[in-house]
Image (spheres, grey):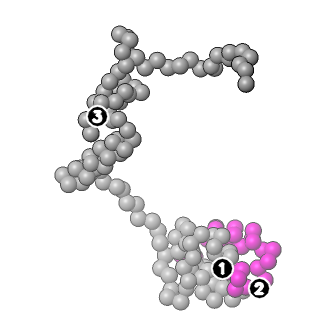
Amino acid sequence: MAVISYVPPKKEIIDRRSPEGNYYVAKCDLCGTDFYPKRKNAKFCSVSCMKLSFRNKQDEMKRSGNAPKKKVVPGKVAQMEPSMTKITGVNNLYSYVKGKISGMHGRKDEFMSSVRNLDIGKIYKIENAVIKRLSSGSWGVHF
């Protein structure tokens, strides 16, 4: 294969040398290895060292008691009767009810909108099924 013509690259090649013409050399904060950084302020030689350093800081903060506290916001949850089956996800609920009730074919949109619009703790009855909304994404079903 013969070279017909030279096509210059579309992007300029980034020169990572210092103003003196040398490449920057840095020392990894974790393992101490000398490396050529892509940025002047790089602290770690690799992603592995960066992740390990982060995990070490997290462990140290947990041991010292200065770990950031996670806010836990209690959600509204209704009580489920012992005879009910708990189902998570509205599509799973539809599939479960459709398998138990023969007249569900063609009524998916009506069923889904009715069940989604239920307030937590409220009950929806369809034929011989009793559906209770337990939380924002779960329902209890009893036949």
Q: Nearer the viewer, residue 7 or 82?
A: 7
Sequence-first tag of 1 and 2: 1
Question: Mark 2 belongs to which amino acid?
Answer: Ser
- Name the residue carrying label 1: 96
What residue appears at the point 52 percent right and 70 percent down from the top-left corner? Answer: 135
Q: Nearer the viewer, residue 87 or 77?
A: 87
- Please check the rendered image and state whether residue 104 is part of the magenta-colored stretch, yes or no: yes
Q: Position of residue 58 (x, y in %)?
A: 28, 50
Q: Quick one: quadrant of the N terminus?
A: top right
Name of the residue lying farthest toward the right? 106
Question: Mark 1 belongs to which amino acid?
Answer: Tyr
Q: Quick one: quadrant of the C terminus?
A: bottom right
The residue stretch that appears in magenta: 96-122
Vertical position of residue 83 compared to residue 62: above or below: below
Helix or strand or loop: what does disc 3 sit on? loop
How many angstroms separate mark 3 from mark 2 (CA)? Answer: 69 Å
- Name the residue carrying label 2: 102
Q: Position of residue 71 (x, y in %)?
A: 36, 56
Name of the residue lying farthest toward the front? 1
Residues at circles 1 and 2 in contact by the CB criterion of under 8 Å: no
Question: Mark 3 belongs to which amino acid?
Answer: Thr
Vertical position of residue 70 compared to residue 26: above or below: below
Q: Position of residue 66 (x, y in %)?
A: 23, 50
- Please check the rendered image and state whether residue 82 is part of the magenta-colored stretch, yes or no: no
What residue appears at the point 50 percent right and 82 percent down from the top-left corner? Answer: 80
Q: Is residue 54 visible?
A: no
Vertical position of residue 76 compared to residue 56: above or below: below
- Name the residue carrying label 3: 33
The overriding secondary structure of the stretch rendered in magenta is helix
Q: Is residue 88 visible?
A: yes
